[in-house]
Amino acid sequence: MKTPRAERLVDMTRYLMERPRTLVPLTFFANRFSSAKSSISEDLTILKKTLKERGVGLLETIPGAAGGAKFYPYILEREADEFVNDMLKQVNDETRVLPGGYVYLSDLLGQPAILRQVGRIIATEYLDMDIQAVMTAATKGVPMAAAVAAQLNVPFVIVRSGENKVTEGPTVSVNYLTGSSKHVEKMELSRRSLPTGLNILIVDDFMKAGGTINGMKTLAKEFDSHVKGVAVFAEGRARQRQVDDFTSLLHVDTNLDSGEVIKVQIGNYKENIFRGRENRSVRN
Amino acid sequence: MKTPRAERLVDMTRYLMERPRTLVPLTFFANRFSSAKSSISEDLTILKKTLKERGVGLLETIPGAAGGAKFYPYILEREADEFVNDMLKQVNDETRVLPGGYVYLSDLLGQPAILRQVGRIIATEYLDMDIQAVMTAATKGVPMAAAVAAQLNVPFVIVRSGENKVTEGPTVSVNYLTGSSKHVEKMELSRRSLPTGLNILIVDDFMKAGGTINGMKTLAKEFDSHVKGVAVFAEGRARQRQVDDFTSLLHVDTNLDSGEVIKVQIGNYKENIFRGRENRSVRN
């Protein structure tokens, strides 16, 4: 029996939202709902219009009998700004300052609704790019990496640093220079967790001088990966930065010496995501 | 201008799915779509029917002018079985066996689609329970904890073990006995990451004797938390188990001595989630 349009729309919305950047063929929906492909095409037109009007994402529709639909989640600048300004207010709290210029962020990056918005913002930057995996550093980068990976619908891999009795099997390791204290450290990634030759995006919660991120770039080379970008929730203050090209939602200045002074501004996401290059898919 | 029903349904589906277990008032949707509450009520009836028929979740509708809707994601036993059997085949691979009876799982628990299904299964067990936070152990438990927390729409907190130079501010720590090797270890949780007195769910990727999970239970007590359950992706083989009451998707037997022998069965999730107690919300 043919499924009524109202029910088709509810199910198609859910189905496509759960599978970002995946082509779902017209024939799949036609069979699922015992409906004509022409009806499914009309449904997709309604979905596309609504998702665009509400600023949720781009539904790319591929016409023809072999066609289908692919959902690319994005966020509009206005919603991103609202979210980042809310984060700014929450981070701008002297009690978050930790020794060494670090900032306590784990409460925020442990909330699903916040992580979803962070994921949507970063996914918007890579709307037109084929990112194949997300890389992050244990442990605090993992929630954000998982959230970005969910919106891009790609796997994420976790790099471990320091001495670990981690049970991951054979690993590839590199040495890197911590940016702030100029120590040599070691980080490693399980050999089987990342296929070689992928386009990857590096994600972390916080970046000061960028030593960890630089280390991940070196490690990525060992896997013949192509690092297409770097995204952090917050950039901190650094005397000298090892990484130039990155996107941050927040910029956090703390007093490196006496602690307990904090000044938070928005990061560079507006230029990088909504200005830098023509992000046509979001604009039109 | 009134938003047509078709567009309302698409947007309401998305909006509710992104906010599990949150009451969205009728008036919110009525204003958003410039539509009468009676029309919104009819929309919700369609949503409820479709989400149930497709095995996606329960849309609880609260009638009356002050009413609204709350979406509780769940999974049906049939879909859970299909998923777990697929996992079983993928885990049942001798090359996954690591020294000490551990099993390599990070590739699976780094895939958004897999994590979503794991989250839905565990959320189904706690459909009728008010879980307020998820607790996990760094690092490998984090992706699964984030996925479960997303379906329950509650924050998750990350416990660190061993010697850490972690930048998290003041912490509470406990000592615990590792199950397998009978060493005394230390684990800690940032004081400000978890309010006291919450109902919590403990989540981890892999459990052997249960030492880490037992440690988390002890730590939870220090925060006056009420541990309402324990969920793991896979339980391994253990000579003596410290934890009795837990839910596992897979049961993995490996040869503790010579390695490279693996036998995977389904875990106890069927009894615990779909048999044990009357899970009325899913059944009716």
Image (tube, coloured by chain):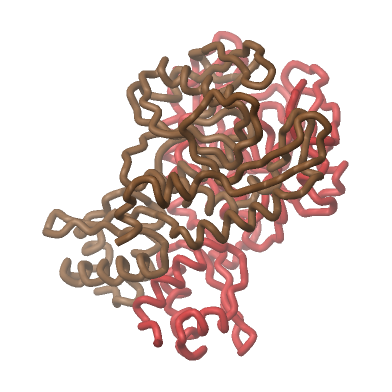
Chain colours: A red, B brown
From the viewer's side, name the closer residue of B91 and A110.
B91
How far from the left and from the top, in percent, is residue B101? 73, 32
Quarter location, residue A216: top right
Q: If the image is split into quadrants, where does the C terminus of chain B sit?
A: bottom left
Q: Is residue B87 left or right of residue B5?
A: right
Looking at the image, which residue is at 60% across and 67% down?
Answer: A280
On the image, the x and y values in percent for residue B18 come to: 41, 54
In depth, the one of A201 and B236 nearer the eye is B236
Any part of residue A123 in sight? no
Most extreme residue toward the left is: B65
Task: Give the percent coordinates (x, y) of residue B162.
Answer: 64, 16
Above or below B6: residue B69: above
Q: Residue at x 56, y 33 (%)?
A: A251
Q: Report the side of B196 relative to A25 (left or right).
A: left
Report the residue at 51% width, 57% height from top: B80
Q: Is the residue A30 above or below the residue A119 in the image?
A: below
Query: At which x and y percent is residue A126?
Result: 64, 56
Along the line of sight, the residue nearer the viewer: A33 or A60: A33
In front of the other: B257 or A233: B257
Q: Is residue A41 visible?
A: yes
Quarter where residue B255 is shown: top right
Does A157 appear above or below B168?
Answer: below
Q: Residue at x 62, y 18 (%)?
A: B178
Circle count: 0
Is A226 left or right of A110, judged from the image as shown? right
Give above or below for A215 relative to B68: above
